[in-house]
Structures are given as C-alpha cells and as structure tokens.
Amino acid sequence: MTSPSLTAAPAAPTPGLAGRALGLLRSLFLRLGVLPFMLVIACVVFATLSDQFLTVQNLVNLLRQSVYLILVSLGQMLALVTGGFDLSVGTVMAITSVVSALAMQALGAAFPDAAWMVVLVGCACGMLAGLVVGLINGFGVAVIGVSPFIVTLGVQSIGFGFALFLTGGVPVSGMPAQFSELFGFGTVLGVPVPILVTAVCVAGMGLLMGRLPTGTHLLAVGGNAKAAALSGIDTRRVLLMAYLLCAGLAAVSGLLLTARVETGEANLGGTVALESIAACVIAGVSLRGGIGRVPNVVMGAIFIGLVQNGMNLASVGSYLQMVVLGALLIVAVVTDQIRHRMVAPGSH
C-alpha cells in the first residue's frame, strides 16, 4: 500500500524590488510629508538647467537669501498650529521697515555723533510697531473671536496703506551706515550676521515648541480648542501670544531686510504671506492646526528660496515664478489632504 505523495505548499510570493521601493516611498511620505520628494526633484531639475546651481557660492547665497522667509515662516507656523493663519506678515515687515527707517532718519539728524544709539532706538521703534500689528491681530482673534482670515486681511490692507501714507510711496533713506554694515552685510567669524540672528531665533523656537509647556499649549489649542480649555489652558492667552510672536518674528525679518536694502520700504514683504504659508504647508504644518515642527518649517522655507534661486538661474520670468509658487502651494495642500486621509482612513 503506497502512501499518498505529499505536495509542498506554494511559497508566499515575495514582493519585488519595485514593490519594496513603493512601500518605502509610502512610509517616507506618511512620516515626513511631501517636502523631501520636492527637494530632490527641485535639485535635480535646477542642477540640470544650470551648472551654477550646486556651486558652494550659490548655496551660501541661497541660505543668506532664505533667512528672511525662514523667520516669517516660523511665525506663520505658530498661527497655523493654533488653527488660524496670518495674512498680515508682509504688513508687519513693511511697518517695521518704515517706522525704524523714519526713526533713524530723524534721530540721526538730531544726534549725528551717536550712531549706535540711533540704530538701537530705531530698531526698538520698528519692533514695537510690528508688535502693535500682532497685538491687534491677537486681540481680534483671541478676545473678540473674529475669523483670522478677516482680521489679518483687514490689518494687511490698513497696514500697507499706513506705511504708504508715512512715506508717500518714497523709500526712506538717511539711516546710519552702521545699521546696514552690521545687520545687512556684517559677518561674525565669517558667518553673515542675518544667518546668526536667524539661527538664534530657530533655536529659540525649537526650545519653545519642543521643551516648554507653551509649545504643548499651542498644539493643544490647534488640535481641539474646547478640550484645551477644559483641561485648564487659557486659550485666549495662547492665541494672543501666537500672533504676537508671529508679528515679532516678521518684524525681525523686516529689520534685517531693511538693513540689506539700506532703505525703509513701504512695499517690503508684498508676497511673503503666500510664501510663508506655502513653506509651512510643504513642511507638513497642518492647515487644520495641531501639527507643526520647527526643523521642517526651516527646510520648507529653504525649499521656497531654492525654487526661486533656481528659477532665477534658469532665467524664468518673475510672472512665471508667481505661477510656480502658487502651483506649489496647491500641490502641497492637496498632498497634505491625501496624507491626512492615508494616516487616518475615513477622515474627511
């Protein structure tokens, strides 16, 4: 009597190389967002279009040009993680630029031999003016309860109009040379001063969001404001602080850029609101609030600067650059929505 032959069970199919690569890309997308993919694509495209793109000189220049947007984007992140946004960051830069320049111009004429006193007082006046804009935004959102869109859009219009009224549409000159020599073109141990100032702000923001209770409160308010209030968090104070810090960082950026161009400009920061929101969204900051990381936002701002730099080297016109930036924002929002649904299936 013969025993029936035993047949081996078919082996489970092993995923091919393409399947493993897709799985890795999917996990990276869910964990890191769309930013790494956009960075790689942009570097490949612009390196192909221009031989100068990957040179050390151009990369240093790129970092120097990106510091202004990095500062504004860090502030924009604070507004976004609380569930709002700030359309008036460009106004803050313009008001800071105009007020600081006018103060330095007046004080410089009165005290020609006290240049550093003039610079310090002028910077303080510009920062104070920028913080007033942030206080108005925060009061409208946190205390009155008006939509951030309405408040910041209205403040944006008022602020730009006020800056134009103060200057008559003419750039303000006559600032002490020391201001631009230090904050615009100065270096410390070979590192440009604007990069050092930005590094300090980035470190402070990293400490705020990662180590201090304030960062937890900001994320909690953006995640669920009612639950945050029930847990004992003063949501009004948190929102007010978010818009004040947002304005403060934009004001610092405005001062540095004023030193760079050596004049007070009423049209400074005209497109920075769109660019900062795009940088944050590309960096994975959720438009629904409650999600945002400082290192990612820094890389997102550098990415926007990288795209602008690459398009300049490729001789892309300024009008087409606006089209590209708008398209990047749309792509980032769509991919953020797709990623959100992949992480939490069934959510809408």
Image: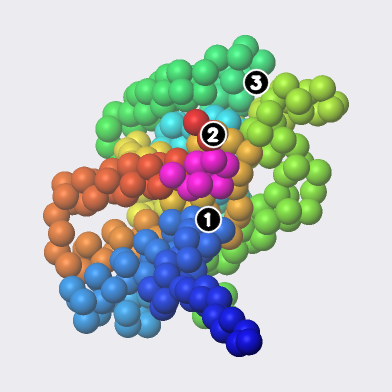
Question: Which residue has dot 2 on it?
Answer: 347
Left or right: 208 as drawn, with respect to 49: right
> In the rendered image, which residue does mark 1 sit on?
30
Please tell me whether the stretch drawn in magenta is mainly helix, strand or loop. Answer: helix
Query: In the image, residue 148 lies at what x, y percent?
Result: 51, 23
Q: Is residue 268 visible?
A: no
Give the residue displayed 45% in from the left and 31% down from the top.
88
Using the rendered view, name the quadrant where residue 97 is placed. top left
Which residue lies at the image location 61% right of the left edge and 87% below the top edge? 2
Q: Residues within 10 Å of mark 3 (few under 14, many from 20)?
A: many
What type is the residue that disc 2 sits on? Ser
Three-letter amino acid code at the position of disc 1: Leu
Which badge, 3 or 2, is on the more N-terminal residue? 3
In the rendered image, residue 238 lying in the magenta stretch gets the answer no
Relative image position of residue 332 (x, y in whole percent): 39, 47
Q: Which mark is residue 142?
A: 3
Magenta residues?
A: 338-345
